[in-house]
Amino acid sequence: MALEVYWGSGSPYAWRVLLALEVKQMNYESHRLGFTDEELKSEEYLSISPRGKVPAIRDGSVTVHESIAIMRYLEDIKPEPVLFGCNPVERSKIWCSIMEVMNYIEPNILNYARTIFYGELAEKKLLAVEARKAIENELIYLNKSLEKKEYLSSEKLSAADIVLYPVIPFLTRAANKENTEDVSGTLRSINEHYPAISVWCKKIESIPGYEKTYPPHWKD
Ligand SMILES: N[C@@H](CCC(=O)N[C@@H](CS)C(=O)NCC(=O)O)C(=O)O
């Protein structure tokens, strides 16, 4: 039975899973869900993803939700190419980068991009500006780290790169949707302000199959 993948267009979390599947060259049955309660909170979908969020997967009798847990599951069922490291040192570096994205960038994404996409800027502008500044600090840190090595954790592609990558176009899209100096800041142009991140993005974008993972509604 084919692996079933539930995702939503534009979700950076779902995008991680789609990218991992391409890197590992895995076949899957795709289920694109809309961001509606009918689709995400149906009894059937909640039995796969109990919080009613994307991404989630079903592999026979196994269901997994949470993007990074799914990526780790994929590594177990299809170990090559290795994304989570081959030895304790590699693994510790990869997990450190993943945890940094989760702890220092992800909480700010909620306050930044979602405020813009959900049209809540009028009430939450201060929160969005604070989040933008915190994200910029993280991007400075990541840019410095990517000046020294090819990929986030080492000289080769790893799960850490796949965890971070979708966040960058997601933030840029949010920044360009609003596009005022105080809300968008430097997030409008990663190329201009964070050149090492920009070079690294191009490496991810050259992964065979990348185009298949690009959010379809962003192409419209
Ligand atoms: N921590 C989760 C986050 C998943 C998540 O927040 N997904 C959003 C889309 S970006 C979602 O499905 N939201 C719909 C909802 O909460 O109703 C992961 O890494 O998979």
Image (cartoon, helix red, strand yellow):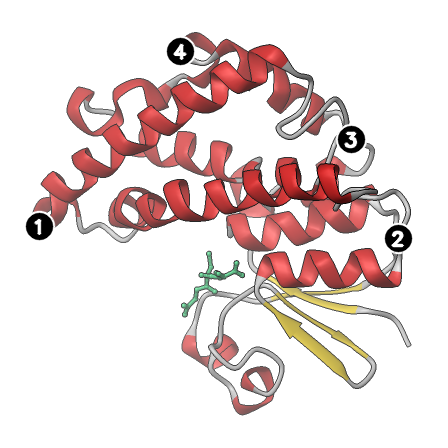
Of the 4 image quadrants, the one containing the N terminus is: bottom right
**Residue in view at x 35 percent, y 24 percent:** 187
Q: Is residue 143 left or right of residue 82?
A: left
Mark 3 element type: loop
Q: CA distance from mark 1 to mark 3?
A: 40 Å
In the rendered view, would you say 138 is above or below 74? Answer: above
Ligand 1 within 8 A of label 2's CB?
A: no
Q: CA distance from mark 2 to mark 3?
A: 18 Å
Residue picked out by circle 4: 193
- Residue holding disc 1: 123
Q: Residues within 10 Å of mark 3 (few under 14, many from 20)?
A: few
Q: Residue drawn 72% across and 58% down?
A: 72
Residue underneath mark 3: 207
Choose mark 2 or mark 3, whichever is in front: 2
For the residues labelled 2 and 4, say whether their Cβ atoms are less than 8 Å apart: no
Q: Is residue 198 visible?
A: no
Give the residue type that dot 3 points to. Answer: Ile
CA distance for labels 4 and 3: 24 Å
As helix, strand or loop, the secondary structure at mark 4 comes to: helix
- Residue that carries the numbered disc 2 in the rendered image: 79
